[in-house]
Image (cartoon, rainbow, N blue to C red):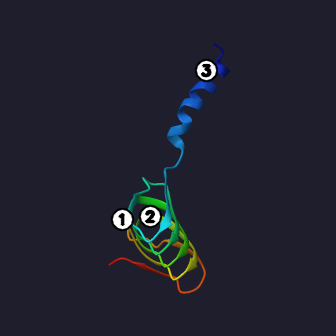
Amino acid sequence: MTVVQATLILSALALPASLSAQARYEGAGATQELDCDGGTATIQGAGNTIRVTGRCSALVIEGASNRVQADLAPRGSIRISGASNTVTYRTADGSKARINVAGAGNRVSVAK
């Protein structure tokens, strides 16, 4: 086995460990808990009550009238597209999330 072949094999074996975790929920009218394990949490649907744990690096909400409580990584991000979503978040170090909101009546606040 050449050095190049060994390097390629070791690189391929290491790849899955470097991928970010992802948690996804799609639906309507549910109460659910998601663990994003440091990766991205995506919520698609309407009328859900979701608790997101795992210090997410990113939270993505697409839909309407969702109520979400999220545990974000320091300087994590929140992206909302839709209407009347309510997000409350906290970070372990108290840093502010990067927030991008498109739609009417969406609210984002820091948990007390």
Find out whether the residues at labels 2 and 3 contact each other: C-beta distance under 8 Å.
no
Taking depth in this image into account, of 110 and 63 the one nearest to the observer is: 63
* Residue 75 x, y percent position in the rendering: 48, 66
Q: Label 1 sits on what residue type?
A: Ala
Find out whether the residues at labels 2 and 1 contact each other: C-beta distance under 8 Å.
yes
Residue shown at 65% from the left, 20% from the top: 5
Q: Which residue is mark 2?
A: 74
Taking depth in this image into account, of 46 and 100 the one nearest to the observer is: 46
Q: Which residue is mark 3?
A: 6
Which badge, 2 or 1, comes first in the chain's sequence? Answer: 2
Distance of label 2 from label 1 (alpha carbons): 7 Å
Distance of label 2 from label 3 (alpha carbons): 37 Å
Please tell me whether residue 85 is drawn above or below residue 52 in the rendered image.
Answer: below
Q: Label 2 sits on what residue type?
A: Pro
Instruction: Left or right? Give the position of 52 relative to 63.
Output: left
Whether residue 57 appears in this view of the structure is yes
Please tell me whether residue 82 is drawn above or below residue 51 in the rendered image.
Answer: below
Q: Quadrant of residue 90?
A: bottom left
Q: Which residue is mark 1?
A: 92
Quadrant containing the N terminus in the rendered view? top right
Q: Label 3 sits on what residue type?
A: Ala
Asked which secondary structure carries label 2, the reply is strand
* Residue 63 x, y percent position in the rendering: 55, 73
Asked which secondary structure carries label 1, the reply is loop
Taking depth in this image into account, of 40 and 5 the one nearest to the observer is: 40
